[in-house]
C-alpha cells in the first residue's frame, strides 16, 4: 500500500514538475506569465498562488483515485459482495471543510487584488489620459490633454499611470495589453476604464480579444513605453506640426499629391497636410506622423517600405476582411510607380531621416525584457 | 397509480386524423410516442450532430496548425466555430442527456412512459427540426458567424445584414420550445409516476439529477427566449433593443444570455453527474457513498447556477463591487462540486472495482472534471480572468468541463446502457482501444491549449503571426484531433460490429442496481409486465441481494389494472413541422407563409387536444399465463 502511494505520488509529482517547467518556459512576446507592469504582475501572482494550491488538489485527488481503483480492483473469480457502506457523517463534514478552506484561501487574495487593480482611478496631474475607441478593425487613441490623435500604437511614458477611457464605435472589442494589464471590453454607448503602468521601456504587444468578425484576427496593437525624454520628443512631433510645403524630393512630392488624387484623404487624416485641409475623420485611422509607426496595418507587420507597398497593393491579401479599398487595378500601368511614391511620402511623415524609425524598433525590441523577434 | 387508470367519463373526441397504429417502418417512428423510441431518436440525432460539430472542429484545428494558413477563409472560419459551439451545446450534448433521460428515467422509476407521451414526441421533433433549420443556413447564404453566444451588437442588422444571424435566433427559438416542454414533462413524470415505494429519497441519483436539470430548463430558457425574441424583433420589425445607433444596450444581451447560459452548463453537466453516480456504484458493487449529500449538492449547484452569470462578464466593466460578489458566489459552487468528487471516490474505496470501458470513462471523467473545476476556480478570480478571458485558456477550461465533464461521462453511459437498449454487448476489447484513443486524444487536444492561453493566444482568430510562441502547442493540439477521430471511428465500428454479431446482453450484464436491469434487453414496449415495488434505494440490488442491505420484505399489495399503452399520434410531428416552416417565414419575413403555418398550429392544437385518449390496455401477465 505504501509502495503504491509512493508510485502514484511520484507520477503526479513528475507531471506537476513537467507542467510547471513547460509554462514557466513559455516567455513569448504575448505571454501573460512574464508581466511588465504592476497591474499584470498582481494579476499573475494571484494565478500562481492558485496554481501551486491546485497541484496539491490534483495530486491528492488523482493519487487517492488511482490508488483506490487499483487497490480495490476486482480480482479474477472474486464474486464477493463488499460491505454496502452508505456513508459516513464525520467524513462528510471533514471533506466539506476542505473545499471551504481552499476556497477561502483563494477568495481573500482575489478580493484584495481585485480592488487594487479594478477600482475606479481618478485621474491625477501625473497621469496620462487616453480615450480609446475600438473600430472594426483598428484602434483610435486620443490624448485629450495633449491634443494628439493617433492609431494602433499607444505611446506612453515609463513609470506613469496610464488611464484609458474606452468605448466602441461599432461592435464589441476588447483591449488586451497582456504584459501590462488584463483586458477590458470596449462597448458602444458605454465608457469603460482600464489603467496600467509600464515599468520599463519597450514595445508591448496586444490584440483585440472579442470577436468582431472580418479582420478580427488582424486587429492588433502596440503599447510603446518610452523614457520621459523620448516621450517628449514623440509628443513634440505632433504638437509642433508645420503645414506641409512642396517637398524637395520629387518622389515624396508625387506621393503627397497622390494622397488626395487617389482618394486617401477622403477617409484618412494627416494633420498639417495642407493649408485649408480639414482634419478629424474619427471613423478612419489617423495617419499623422505615419513614418513614426512601427507597424502596418494595425500591428500586423513591420512598417517597412516593402510591407507598406504590399499593403497598398492588395489590402485584402495582407488583412482579409478589412475595409481599405484596393486602389489600383492589376492592369494599371502606373500602379507600382504610384505605390512607390505614396510609400515614400507616408514614411517621410514625422521622420527626420529614413533610418530613425528602424533604429527605434531595434532600440526598443519587442516585448520589453523578454524575447525579441 | 395513474398508469393504466381508465377515464372516469367519456371525453369528447374530434377525429381530424385517425390515430396511427404502425408498429414498424418509418411511419411508426414518425408517429411514435414511446419514450424508448424517442430516447433512441434523441441519442441518434445527438450523435449525428456531434459528428457534424466534430467535422467543424477538425477544420478549425487544421486551419490553426501553423501560422498564416488559409485552409478556410476568415468568414468560413467564423461560421465553423459558431456552428461548432452552437451544435455541441444545443444540438449534441444537451439532447444526449435528454435522450438518456428519456429512455432510462421512466425505467428507473418503474413508470410505463413519460406523463405526456405526445408532448415528448413534440419536444423531440421540435428540437430535431429546429436543428435542421439551423443547418440549412449553410445552403442559404451562410451559417451564423457571431459566436455561439452571439454578442450584441454583432447581431444587429446594421452590423450583420446576412440571414445567418436570423437562422441562429429562429433555430434556437424553435429548439428552445422543444427543450422547455421536455423539461416540464420530466418534472411531472418524476413527481407523479414513480412506482409504489419509490420515495424521493429512494430515487436513483440519475433521476434526481434529471429532476434538477428539468427545473433548470424551465427557469433558464425563458430569459434566452426573451433575448432571442428581442433580436428577432430588432431584425424583422425595426425595434432598437440592441441597435447602438438607437441607444441600444449591448450589455443587456450578455446578462440575458448568461443568466440562461450558466444554468445551461449545469443542464448539460448534471445528467452526466447522474450517469456517473449510477456507473461508479455498479462497477464498484457498492451503493453510492453519501447519497443524500450527492443529491443535495446537485440541487445546490443547480440553484447557485442562477447566481453566477456575470462571471462570464468580468471584463465588461461592471465594476469591482459586482465582480467581487460574483467571484464569491462562483467560488461557493466549488464546494458542492468538490463534495461530489469526494463521494464518488469514497464509493470506489472498499469496492470490487471492475475496469470495464464504462468504468474507465467514468474514472477519466473524475480526473478531467477535477482539472476543469480547478481552472474554473482560477477563472472565477476576476483579476486573473482579465488576463486570460477569451484566450485559449478559457477554451481549454470549458472543454475540460463540458467535453470532459459531459462527453466522457456520456460515453461511459453509452457503454453502460448500450446492452440494455439493444440487447447486444459492445466489444470490451475494442472498448479499451476506444477509451485510450478518445481520452488520450482529448488530453492531447486540450491540455496544450492551457499553455497557449497563457502565451496570449486569443480564441476565435483564424490565424496568428509567427514568433508569438503559439506554434508548437497548436501542432500537438491538431495531432490530438486525429487520435480522437480514430477513437470515435473505432466506436462507430464497434457499434456496427455489435449489431452484426455482438454477444447477447441478457437482462443484467453488469449486475446492475436499478430497475432498468430487472427487465429484458431491449425492454418490451410496455416496460414492466409487473408493477415493480420498491423497498430500498438501488431497488433491483435489494431484490437480488436482500441480505446485503437488510431490505425489508415487500408487504405492500396493490391492484393491477393492466397496462395502458398510449396511442400514436400525427399531431406532434405536424405541429413541429409547422414551427419549422414558420421559422423560415420569420427568417425571410414572408408573412403569408407565417399566417398559414400559424393556422396549422391552431388547428393542430385543436386536433391534438380533442384527439381522445386512444391506445389500448394489455395484460402481459395473463398473456404469458
Image: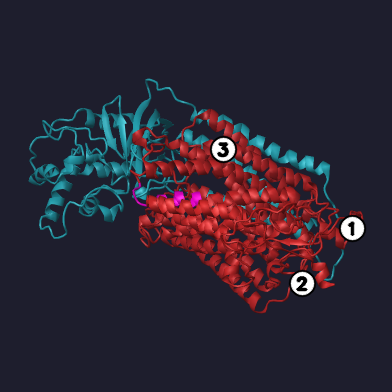
Chain colours: A cyan, B red
Residue at image mark 3: B381
Where does the image place residue B191, in percent across and percent down from the top left? Answer: 73, 47
- Alpha-carbon neighbours of circle 1 within 10 Å: few (<14), some, or many (≥20)? few
Residue at 77% from the left image edge and 69% from the top image edge: B507
Q: Which residues are magenta?
A: B160-174
- Alpha-carbon neighbours of circle 3 within 10 Å: few (<14), some, or many (≥20)? many
Up/down of B293 relative to B621, above or below: above
Of the pair B223 and B324, the residue shown nearer to us: B223
- The quarter holding residue A202 reads top left
Q: Is there CB contact under 8 Å for labels 1 and 2?
A: no
Residue B171, magenta (yes or no): yes
Residue at 79% from the left image edge and 68% from the top image edge: B620
State the SS at label 2: loop
Residue at image mark 2: B506
Where does the image place residue B13, in percent across and percent down from the top left? Answer: 63, 56
Up/down of B24 relative to B548, above or below: below
Up/down of B129 relative to B28, above or below: above
State the SS at label 1: helix
Amino acid at each position: 500500500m505504501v509502495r503504491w502511494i509512493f508510485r502514484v505520488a511520484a507520477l503526479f509529482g513528475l507531471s506537476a514538475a513537467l507542467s510547471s517547467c513547460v509554462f514557466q518556459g513559455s516567455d513569448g512576446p504575448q505571454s501573460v506569465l512574464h508581466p511588465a507592469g504592476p497591474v499584470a504582475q498582481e494579476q499573475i501572482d494571484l494565478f500562481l498562488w492558485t496554481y501551486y494550491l491546485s497541484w496539491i488538489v490534483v495530486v491528492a485527488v488523482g493519487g487517492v483515485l488511482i490508488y483506490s481503483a487499483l487497490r480495490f480492483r476486482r480480482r479474477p473469480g472474486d464474486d464477493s459482495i463488499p460491505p454496502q457502506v452508505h456513508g459516513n457523517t464525520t467524513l462528510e463534514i471533514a471533506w466539506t471543510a476542505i473545499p471551504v478552506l481552499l476556497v477561502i484561501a483563494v477568495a481573500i487574495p482575489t478580493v484584495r487584488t481585485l480592488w487594487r487593480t479594478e477600482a475606479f482611478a481618478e485621474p491625477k496631474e501625473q497621469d496620462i489620459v487616453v480615450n480609446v475607441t475600438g473600430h472594426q478593425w483598428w484602434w483610435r487613441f486620443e490624448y485629450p490633454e495633449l491634443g494628439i490623435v493617433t492609431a494602433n500604437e499607444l505611446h506612453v511614458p515609463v513609470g506613469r499611470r496610464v488611464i484609458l477611457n474606452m468605448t466602441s464605435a461599432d461592435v464589441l472589442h476588447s483591449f488586451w495589453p497582456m504584459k501590462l494589464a488584463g483586458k477590458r471590453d470596449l462597448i458602444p454607448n458605454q465608457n469603460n476604464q482600464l489603467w496600467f503602468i509600464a515599468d520599463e521601456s519597450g514595445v508591448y504587444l496586444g490584440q483585440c480579444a472579442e470577436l468582431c468578425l472580418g479582420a478580427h484576427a488582424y486587429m492588433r496593437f502596440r503599447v510603446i513605453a518610452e523614457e520621459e525624454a523620448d516621450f517628449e520628443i514623440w509628443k513634440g512631433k505632433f504638437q509642433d506640426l508645420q503645414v506641409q510645403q512642396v517637398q524637395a524630393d520629387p518622389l515624396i512630392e508625387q506621393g503627397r499629391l497622390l494622397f488626395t488624387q487617389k482618394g486617401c484623404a477622403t477617409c484618412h487624416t494627416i494633420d498639417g497636410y495642407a493649408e485649408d485641409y480639414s482634419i478629424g475623420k474619427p471613423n478612419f485611422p489617423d495617419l499623422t506622423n505615419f513614418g513614426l509607426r512601427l507597424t502596418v496595418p494595425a500591428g500586423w507587420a513591420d512598417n517597412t517600405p516593402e510591407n507598406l507597398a504590399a499593403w497598398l497593393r492588395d489590402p485584402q491579401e495582407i488583412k482579409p476582411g478589412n475595409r481599405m479599398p484596393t486602389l489600383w487595378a492589376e492592369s494599371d500601368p502606373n500602379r507600382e510607380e504610384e505605390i512607390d511614391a505614396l510609400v515614400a511620402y507616408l514614411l517621410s511623415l514625422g521622420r527626420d531621416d529614413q533610418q530613425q524609425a528602424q533604429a527605434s524598433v531595434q532600440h526598443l525590441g519587442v516585448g520589453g525584457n523578454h524575447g525579441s523577434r | 397509480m395513474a398508469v393504466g387508470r381508465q377515464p372516469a367519463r367519456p371525453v369528447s373526441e374530434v377525429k381530424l386524423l385517425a390515430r396511427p397504429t404502425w408498429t414498424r417502418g418509418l411511419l411508426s417512428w414518425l408517429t411514435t410516442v414511446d419514450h424508448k423510441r424517442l430516447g433512441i431518436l434523441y441519442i441518434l440525432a445527438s450523435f449525428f450532430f456531434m459528428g457534424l460539430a466534430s467535422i467543424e472542429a477538425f477544420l478549425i484545428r487544421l486551419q490553426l496548425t501553423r501560422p498564416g494558413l488559409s485552409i478556410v477563409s476568415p468568414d468560413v472560419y467564423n461560421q465553423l466555430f459558431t456552428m461548432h459551439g452552437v451544435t455541441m451545446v444545443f444540438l449534441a450534448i444537451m439532447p444526449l442527456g435528454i435522450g438518456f433521460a428519456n429512455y432510462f428515467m421512466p425505467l428507473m422509476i418503474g413508470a410505463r412512459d413519460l406523463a405526456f407521451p405526445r408532448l415528448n414526441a413534440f419536444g423531440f421533433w421540435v428540437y430535431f427540426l429546429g436543428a435542421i433549420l439551423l443547418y440549412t443556413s449553410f445552403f442559404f447564404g451562410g451559417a451564423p458567424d457571431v459566436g455561439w453566444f452571439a454578442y450584441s451588437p454583432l447581431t444587429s442588422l446594421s452590423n450583420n445584414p446576412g440571414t445567418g444571424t436570423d437562422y441562429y435566433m429562429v433555430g434556437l427559438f424553435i429548439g428552445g420550445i422543444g427543450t422547455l416542454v421536455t423539461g416540464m414533462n420530466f418534472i411531472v413524470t418524476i413527481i407523479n409516476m414513480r412506482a409504489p415505494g419509490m420515495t424521493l429519497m429512494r430515487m436513483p441519483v440519475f433521476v434526481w439529477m434529471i429532476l434538477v436539470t428539468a427545473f433548470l430548463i424551465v427557469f433558464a430558457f425563458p430569459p434566452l427566449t426573451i433575448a432571442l425574441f428581442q433580436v428577432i424583433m430588432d431584425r424583422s420589425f425595426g425595434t432598437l433593443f440592441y441597435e447602438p445607433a438607437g441607444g441600444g444596450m449591448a450589455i443587456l444581451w450578455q446578462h440575458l444570455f448568461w443568466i440562461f447560459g450558466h444554468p445551461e452548463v449545469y443542464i448539460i453537466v448534471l445528467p452526466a453527474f447522474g450517469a456517473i453516480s449510477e456507473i461508479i456504484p455498479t462497477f464498484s458493487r457498492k451503493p453510492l457513498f453519501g447519497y443524500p449529500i450527492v443529491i443535495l449538492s446537485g440541487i445546490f449547484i443547480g440553484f447557485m447556477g442562477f447566481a453566477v452569470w456575470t462571471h462570464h462578464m468580468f471584463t465588461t466593466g461592471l465594476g469591482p463591487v459586482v465582480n467581487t460578489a460574483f467571484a464569491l458566489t462562483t467560488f461557493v459552487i466549488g464546494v458542492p462540486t468538490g463534495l461530489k468528487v469526494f463521494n464518488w471516490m469514497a464509493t470506489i474505496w472498499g469496492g470490487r472495482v471492475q475496469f470495464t470501458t464504462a468504468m474507465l470513462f467514468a474514472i477519466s471523467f473524475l480526473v478531467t472534471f477535477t482539472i476543469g473545476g480547478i481552472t474554473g476556480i482560477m477563472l472565477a478570480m476576476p483579476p486573473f480572468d482579465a488576463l486570460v478571458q477569451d484566450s485559449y485558456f478559457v477554451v481549454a477550461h470549458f472543454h475540460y468541463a463540458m467535453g470532459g465533464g459531459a462527453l466522457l461521462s456520456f460515453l461511459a453511459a453509452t457503454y453502460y446502457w448500450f446492452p440494455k437498449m439493444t440487447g447486444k454487448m459492445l466489444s470490451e476489447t475494442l472498448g479499451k482501444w476506444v477509451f485510450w484513443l478518445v481520452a488520450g486524444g482529448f488530453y492531447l487536444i486540450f491540455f496544450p491549449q492551457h499553455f497557449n492561453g497563457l502565451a496570449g493566444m486569443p480564441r476565435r482568430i483564424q490565424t496568428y503571426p509567427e514568433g508569438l510562441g503559439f506554434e508548437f502547442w497548436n501542432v500537438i493540439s491538431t495531432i490530438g484531433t486525429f487520435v480522437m477521430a480514430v477513437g470515435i471511428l473505432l466506436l462507430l465500428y464497434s457499434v456496427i460490429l455489435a449489431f452484426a454479431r455482438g454477444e447477447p446482453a441478457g437482462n443484467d450484464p453488469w449486475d446492475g442496481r436499478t430497475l432498468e436491469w430487472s427487465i429484458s434487453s431491449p425492454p418490451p414496449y410496455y416496460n414492466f409486465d409487473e408493477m415493480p415495488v420498491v423497498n430500498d434505494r438501488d431497488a433491483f440490488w435489494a431484490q437480488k441481494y436482500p441480505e446485503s442491505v437488510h431490505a425489508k420484505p415487500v408487504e405492500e399489495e396493490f391492484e393491477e389494472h393492466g397496462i395502458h399503452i398510449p396511442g400514436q399520434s400525427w399531431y406532434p410531428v405536424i405541429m413541429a413541422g409547422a414551427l419549422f416552416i414558420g421559422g423560415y417565414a420569420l427568417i425571410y419575413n414572408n408573412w403569408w407563409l407565417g399566417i398559414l403555418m400559424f393556422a396549422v398550429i391552431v388547428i393542430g392544437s385543436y386536433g391534438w387536444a380533442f384527439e381522445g385518449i386512444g391506445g389500448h390496455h394489455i395484460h402481459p401477465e395473463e398473456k404469458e399465463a
